[in-house]
Amino acid sequence: MQAILLVGGLGTRLRPLTLTTPKQMLPMLHRPMIEHVVSGLARHGVERVVMALGYHDDAFRAAYPDGRCAGVEVCCVVEPEPLDTAGAIRFACEASGMVADGGTFLAANGDVITDLDVGAMLRLHRSSGAEATIHLIEVDDLSRFGVAVTGAGGRVTAFVEKPSPPAPSNWINAGTYLMEPSVIGRIARGRRVSVEREVFPAMVADGTLWALRQNTYWVDAGTPQTYLQAQLDLLDGRRGPAADGVSVEAAVDPDAVVERSVVMAGAVVGAGSAVRGSAVHSGAVIEAGATVLDSVVGSGATIGRGARVTGRSLIGEGSAVEPGATLSGARVPEAA
Ligand code: GTP
């Protein structure tokens, strides 16, 4: 099985972190987000991944110069301009030569961290004769997602992107798809095409779209809250043995408190400071007496002495928070 991973988005919701590093190259625990996604797919038999790149494509190519990522063969393709989710799938298929292979392929948003059973999805895809099968997950807050209604055997009877309330179902598009090559023919070439707004509704009209409803572990890690949550879940052991968040190469003062947090290699956490529910990236410095709560401190950033950074603040790479400052839900630099 081959997979296309969509990793060319701007990641605006994670700015300013994504101004310098594309979303899927941001660290998640101690390795880039993309490696969690790729190794998850590899566990389910994916042997080759095509990365559909755009924004900051150089970061991916520099990280995987030998064409392997998390033990899987990767091929990088770069869109000349952002083509949106379906346009990117078509471009990646053609540019990588996948389309010529002619088989079922997987496509996924590159920021979806999930334990989806791809094998179960493939069985449904085969037995139903679907043209495409999508993974659905049940959520309470539907505002950010596309919602699907399914009928007998999982055939999708309605697909509505970000519906106004009341939504027709609580099952949302979880961002992993199995597709037949014929889907490519539905996507106009050379312009922006959304898989959620154009391709899936057209397939519903033709009765060729199926869905697997599976409430497995799933996080769309594209917001400050979910980017942190995906890491806390690893620390809390929600997806296997609890991980250790503090790198042996970090310098944490014995008088500092670090709780349920990631502190990466080269980071310094000073005396009397507290880091809780947060991620401190490589080389960042938390000065003495500072507090970092539910926030992300980017690589090489500094939190000044006695400062309080809370409420899902995002401190960009190399930025500085003044000593004694109090920030909640802040973005530094703010202009981002
Ligand atoms: P926000 O700006 O915060 O919404 O993030 P985003 O740009 O990543 O958009 P979103 O999370 O909605 O995108 C879903 C997935 O599709 C992500 O993995 C993106 O990287 C990817 N993506 C979105 N647009 C494009 C595109 O035009 N080309 C490619 N190759 N990938 C895209």
Image (spheres, rainbow, N blue to C red):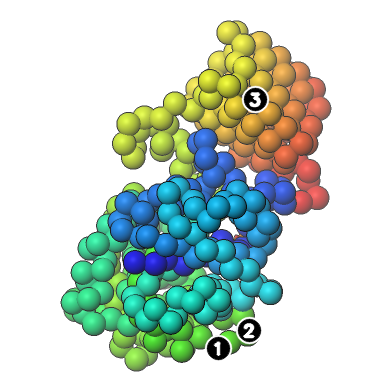
- Dot 1, crowdedness within 10 Å: few (<14), some or many (≥20)? few
- From this view, report whether residue 334 is shown above or below residue 126: above
Q: Amino acid type of disc 1?
A: Ala
Nearest the viewer among 182 and 318 is: 182
Q: Point out which mark residue 188 bears.
A: 1
**Residue with the most extreme front position:** 66
- Dot 3, crowdedness within 10 Å: few (<14), some or many (≥20)? many
Residue 328 place in picture, x, y as percent: 67, 36
Badge 1 residue CB within 8 Å of ligand 1: no
Contact between labelled residues 2 and 1, with CB atoms less than 8 Å apart? yes
Q: Quadrant of the N terminus?
A: bottom left
Q: How far apart are marks 1 and 3 (CA)?
A: 47 Å
Q: Residue at 33% of width from left, 75% of height from top?
A: 104
Q: Residue at 69% of width from left, 29% of height from top?
A: 284
**Which SS class for mark 3?**
loop
Which image quadrant is residue 233 in?
top left
Q: Amino acid type of disc 3?
A: Ala
Residue 102 place in picture, x, y as percent: 37, 81
**Which SS class for mark 1?**
loop
Q: Amino acid type of disc 2?
A: Arg
Whether residue 87 appears in this view of the structure is yes
Which image quadrant is residue 134 in?
bottom left
The residue wearing badge 3 is 267
Q: Residue at 28% of width from left, 81% of height from top?
A: 130
Q: Looking at the image, in which quadrant does ligand 1 appear?
A: bottom right
The residue wearing badge 2 is 191
Nearest the viewer among 290 and 115 is: 115
